[in-house]
Amino acid sequence: MDTRIVGQVKRVNGPIIEARGITDALMQELVQVGEARLTGEIIKLQDGEAIIQVYEDTTGIAPGHNIYGTGAPLSVELGPGLIGTIYDGIQRPLEELEQISGIYIEKGISRPSLNREKIWPFVPLLKEGEPVEGGQVFASVQESQRINHKLLIPPDVKGTIASIKPEGEYTVEEEVAVVRTEKGDVPLRMYQRWPIRRPRPVKKRRPLEIPLLTGQRVIDALFPLAKGGTVAIPGGFGTGKTMTQHAVAKWCDADLIVYIGCGERGNEMTDVLTEFPELIDPRTGRSLMERTILIANTSNMPVSAREASIYTGITLAEYYRDMGLHVAIMADSTSRWAEALRELSGRMEEMPAEEGFPAYLPTRIAEFYERAGYMTCLCGEEGSVSVIGAVSPPGGDFSEPVTQHTKRFVRCFWALDRQLANARHYPAIGWLESYSEYTDDVSPFWAEKAGKEFLDNRRTIMELLQKEVKLQQVIKLVGPDALPDSQRFITEVCTLFKNAFLQQNAFDDIDKYSTVEKQTRMLAVIVGYFDRGNEAIKAGVPLAKIHRMPVLQDISKMKLTIPNDDPDQFDRLMLKMERGFAKLEELYV
Amino acid sequence: MSKDAPQIDEKRLLAGREYVGVDRIDGPLVFIKNTHPVGYQELVECVDPAGKVRLGMVLDTSDEVVCVQVFEGTAGLNMPGTSARFMGEPLTLGVTKEMLGRVFNGLGVPRDEGPVPVATAELDVNGRPINPTSRAYPRDFIQTGISVIDGMNTLIRGQKLPIFSGNGLPHNELAAQITRQARIKGEASDFAIVFAAMGVKNDVAQFFIRTFEESGVLDKVALFLSLADDPSIERIITPKTALTLAEHLAFDCDMHVLVIMTDMSNYCESLREISTLRGEIPSRKGYPGYLYSNLAEIYERAGMIKGRAGSITQIPILTMPNDDISHPIPDLSGYITEGQIVFEREMHGRNLYPPVAGLPSLSRLMKDGIGDGMTRKDHPHLSSQLFAAYSYVKDVRNLASVIGEEELTPLDKQYMEFGERFEREFVNQKHDENRSIEETLDIGWSVLKALPAEELHRVTDEEIEEFFY
Ligand SMILES: Nc1ncnc2c1ncn2[C@@H]1O[C@H](COP(=O)(O)OP(=O)(O)OP(=O)(O)O)[C@@H](O)[C@H]1O
Ligand SMILES: [Mg+2]
């Protein structure tokens, strides 16, 4: 335990402590406050005084209590054993805390983030005498059935391997290799530490070209996210931010998920903890928990750890990226993180900018999203971190500071619409307000996988949705009867598209996610219906007859009836539709 | 750890030391200079000039001055005649099962004639965060006998489901009806009700007491009353005191506890008052930036725990200022709770009871507690269909108000008919009408009959076959 006293408490105001008698404490140094040894971080130093943000409940802390320095900044442990674990905002393993303190989290307790007793199968990949650089892979560990964890030389180490352990089973704490460097020998263990507020270095940023496929049609087909991209999901309470993030976490094609519950409900974390181990990843056939790390700072946990949780999460994500993996991180909700900043700032009596938020809010938001990207890693492999951040605007009003600043720094925006959510149209991603700047970047991928026709169909449907807005305005003024059949048909196709395609039931076994192929075929069916219907109307078929075609029922339920692995059914559906139209045309032409 | 010893001993010695005279009194806050080092959130006993003890808590502590919030108010205090004792530990509540059937004030002091209960444990009223790994996900359907709740916004045991109401709307009646009728299907269990009143009028408290009495459960209820004429600051501690007992009953005594808290808006007002007095930077409408976290510390004290038989279900009631759901109090509550039952004044005006707005109301835990083996297999799709159809009704009504009802298409007219029947037959029910879940679902299908079968996109063909025709 650290015994270096760096100062004494002068004032306690919630999670913010003013300290006096500060000797050699460092900026951003991790400290322990009082004999309860509460974890804190120095966030300001001035004239022998310091301001400390404490990550635990400060009840009972009094002026005069000692502050102990640890000499290191707030860091996380990186190594095998992260996957499948649930941590709090400062990477304390919650399952182990439960063993110490029972159902309530007591303060002042701690446990190493990575289990020190657990034994891992270590496979050396380098030999003695080989030169190494920071970020290079020197060994590997099968961490879970699906993740082969590569052990990396810490970024700031360069030299030659002086010794390396043979293949075998070791704990994370055992020395497995030594690197001889200019500054002396550096022992390597299976884990390393990294300060959470510092991005991990990479070789090069690469352009974003590959979509992060989520299986959610409104996302993949209309507002795609690229691997390494950033997206915000703003929406008032109950509009579906958490459900959308859960759906993406379940079905997206990332190698690893870091899910941060930042100031949200305890039960939502429990939900993930109970549901994910049961769910099977369709791509690998393995349990989803084998690719998931959870960070939980629920809304009743200390507010300063909420501020840290976002950085803890993204640092873990970067670490796996550095092995050449594609990582997706969900932060639910970044607004709670911003509000934690506001609360801490207020208690420090800083000058507020908009709505009480500190003036540095936009900088912090930008720094966070900048840590996303598609990179060439130091080890030479390509890896990515995609960031999916929920935003909870007060009153559901997107003009508030957190939504507005976030919008400046993300390139994709899935705006949740209260009206859609109220109508139980889920996911309630509004098609008029949402956008994705990745659409063009990923269209070569779609053209290759789904054919150019998909891109044309996508354009057609987007145009129809725009036209529909105008038509609806007319209808609101004069009623639907005033419109000619061809225009009313547009509104009907849009309604069909919304019900049959955009709406997706997260709880239905068949509908919960759609492959690229299924999405492509479904879109083709609907656009096909529009084209064919148009021809029929031109040929004189009344709209009311088209409306009554039995195939319409099949189209509106195809998402529920045609499974991902049986796309041939779409051929039959198309055929049935063609026959239906042909029959009508015979009657009227 | 030997170095710690003197500090702790010193604390014990200093605890209880009394300071005569205070330096400033501002609203419910008292400031005392030149004290020994006092701990954050420590319990304080303020002795007023008449010798009566009032409890308080340390809000801010520093070398120079300590700021104390006095829960029983500062009226009648003066600077030289008031003294303060710092107790060296946070505010606790002595809890026991014997508190059921009794009436207390917001701090847990008996308000009735009975003796002070003999506590079996002393618990910190501020509670501690429940470890998310210790929680069990709530799934058990509670039948309230109220169609719009059971059918559309199902209450689950361990859920926090608030009522967003407005002045003069029948939220108390609905809460009372829920407490009278709530049952777990086919189970008789050990239950208790904890009732916390913050700043409500005495007749509201009396209404609830009467209800409990009439349904013969009064000896299963603990009431914590901080009424409109009690010091407003006491409201800040009332829900925490009540939840401390609830946690004891649920997680130590294996009881299923229903906690009713009314009116959360008054709680928030008191919080704003303190915040303003302390000169804190406000966020929206003058409420402190920490209102969200503060409310979460209350609402998150609901749920179920792995390996424990009991549960805490919360029904907080709040009145939306100006019926505005985007006001910070309902807004922040909605961001924390697991859904909300929203009242609509317009429905109340049309004599519909309960006046539950169809669209903005939501139960988030419903999805895991309904369907085959829990309620009935058609429930998930049926409720989704009712929501979808009713939301279209709202559009049609808007359209009708512009172009006139006669101009509507025949289909839209059918939707108008559906909307009317949905509200009159499904939502509307009597104050003592207790419908089984099957009755509720059957009424749901029967009102859907106003629509043609092709319009029912959210239900399967098999369900239409079995339930619609
Ligand atoms: N894709 C979906 N499929 C089915 N139901 C959904 C879907 N999305 C949302 N819902 C419904 O909406 C409810 C609220 O969704 P969710 O919890 O994701 O909202 P939220 O935006 O995260 O709200 P908050 O900000 O309060 O956390 C869910 O409990 C569920 O009933
Ligand atoms: Mg959410």
Image (cartoon, grey):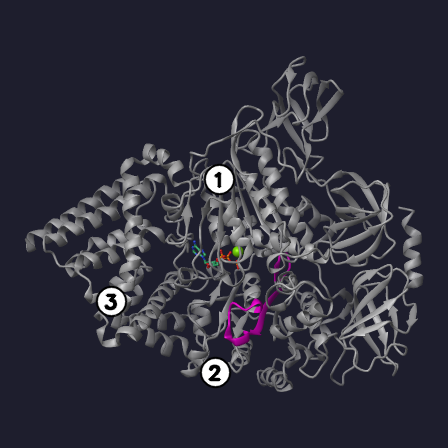
Tally the numbered discs.
3
Mark pair 2, 3: CA separation: 32 Å
> Residue A138: x percent and y percent?
62, 22
Disc 3 chain ID: B
Evaluate whether label 3 is on the same chain as label 1: no
Q: Which secondary structure lies at badge 2?
A: loop
- In this view, B342 is above or below A333: below
Residue drawn where x is 43% and y is 83% of the image: B349
- Whether the residues at callouts 3 and 1 have beta carbons within 8 Å, the answer is no
Mark pair 1, 2: CA separation: 54 Å
Mark pair 3, 1: CA separation: 45 Å
Q: Can residue A388 be seen?
A: yes
User: Mark 2 = which residue?
Assistant: B431
User: Mark 1 = which residue?
Assistant: A229
Q: Which secondary structure lies at badge 3?
A: loop
Magenta highlight on residue B328: yes
User: Mark 3 = which residue?
Assistant: B452
Which residues make up the magenta segment?
B303-329
